[in-house]
Image (tube, rainbow, N blue to C red):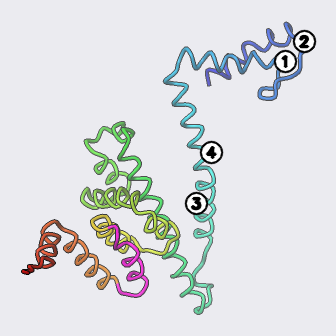
């Protein structure tokens, strides 16, 4: 980087001008101010570049473990020979594959919603975050739009979002519950319980009823039925 190049150029200055000073804990050369002060000066002269560099550093730190886990998983799958797996263990692998798929979808959904709220997708030369997501994931724009919408809805539904991150909901279950609970937040826990006890079709039907009952027209009808007329 520019910082490191400048530091290499300043090595003779740092070592000759301050030969008895303690070594910098960051760069190892004499005088903490030389290398580290230049970084501070670089912030002042190039604030946008410096901020982008820091954001990249934090991003690497936050995603590093996930990248390593993904590479490890990829290596395990590449080395796996299903022909050598006992039949009794194949069913376990199906369940494990489903869990992995759910966790991956949870990460993709939440990250896609966050990306849609920024301008980073514009660098790809596309017109919308949905178009960017469709290109990155090999899906259609309607599918990408539904994924982004689900991610945005989950941001307001902590219980459902937690269940998604734990891998307890499939992609279609999460989409159905998020859409219904966004319309009626009070129904969130009931729908989560329904997901664990019902089929996907039954859950989707219940979510459809929840959305219908949460509409303004349905609310007006309930209020009308609740009216009473008394005379004294």
In this rendered view, identify the residue nearer to me: 172 or 231.
231
x and y, in percent, of residue 124 in the image:
35, 40
Which label number is shown at residue 19?
2
Q: Which residue is mark 4?
A: 61
Which secondary structure lies at badge 1? loop
Could you tell me which residue is drawn at 54 percent across and 88 percent down? 91
Quadrant of the rendered image containing residue 145 = bottom left
Which label number is shown at residue 15?
none
Q: Which residue is mark 1?
A: 30
x and y, in percent, of residue 45 in the image:
55, 14
Q: Earlier in the sequence, mark 4 or mark 1?
A: 1
Q: Earlier in the sequence, mark 3 or mark 1?
A: 1
Q: Earlier in the sequence, mark 4 or mark 2?
A: 2
Q: Earlier in the sequence, mark 2 or mark 1?
A: 2
Inter-mark Cα distance, 4 to 2:
35 Å
Which secondary structure lies at badge 2? loop
**Chief SS of the magenta region:** helix
Q: Residues within 10 Å of mark 4 (few under 14, many from 20)?
A: few
Inter-mark Cα distance, 2 to 1:
7 Å
Left or right: 9, with 83 as reference point: right
Could you tell me which residue is drawn at 56 percent across and 43 percent down? 59
x and y, in percent, of residue 228 in the image:
11, 79
């Amino acid at each position: 980087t520019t910082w490191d190049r400048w530091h290499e150029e300043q090595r003779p200055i740092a070592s000759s001008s301050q030969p008895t000073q303690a070594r910098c804990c960051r760069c190892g050369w004499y005088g903490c101010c030389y290398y580290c002060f230049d970084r501070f000066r670089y912030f002042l002269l190039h604030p946008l570049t410096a901020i982008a560099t820091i954001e990249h550093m934090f991003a690497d730190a936050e995603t590093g473990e996930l990248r390593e886990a993904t590479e490890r998983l990829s290596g395990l799958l590449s080395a796996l020979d299903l022909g050598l797996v006992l039949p009794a263990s194949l069913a376990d692998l199906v369940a494990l594959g489903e869990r992995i798929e759910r966790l991956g979808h949870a990460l993709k959904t939440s990250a896609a919603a966050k990306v849609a709220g920024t301008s980073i997708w514009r660098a790809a030369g596309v017109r919308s975050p949905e178009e960017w997501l469709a290109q990155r994931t090999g899906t259609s724009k309607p599918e990408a739009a539904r994924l982004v919408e689900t991610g945005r809805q989950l941001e307001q539904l902590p219980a459902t979002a937690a269940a998604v991150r734990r891998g307890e909901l499939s992609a279609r279950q999460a989409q159905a519950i998020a859409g219904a609970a966004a319309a009626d937040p009070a129904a969130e826990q009931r729908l989560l319980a329904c997901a664990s006890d019902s089929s996907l079709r039954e859950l989707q039907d219940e979510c459809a009823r929840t959305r219908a009952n949460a509409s303004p027209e349905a609310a007006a009808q309930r209020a009308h039925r609740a009216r009473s007329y008394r005379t004294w």
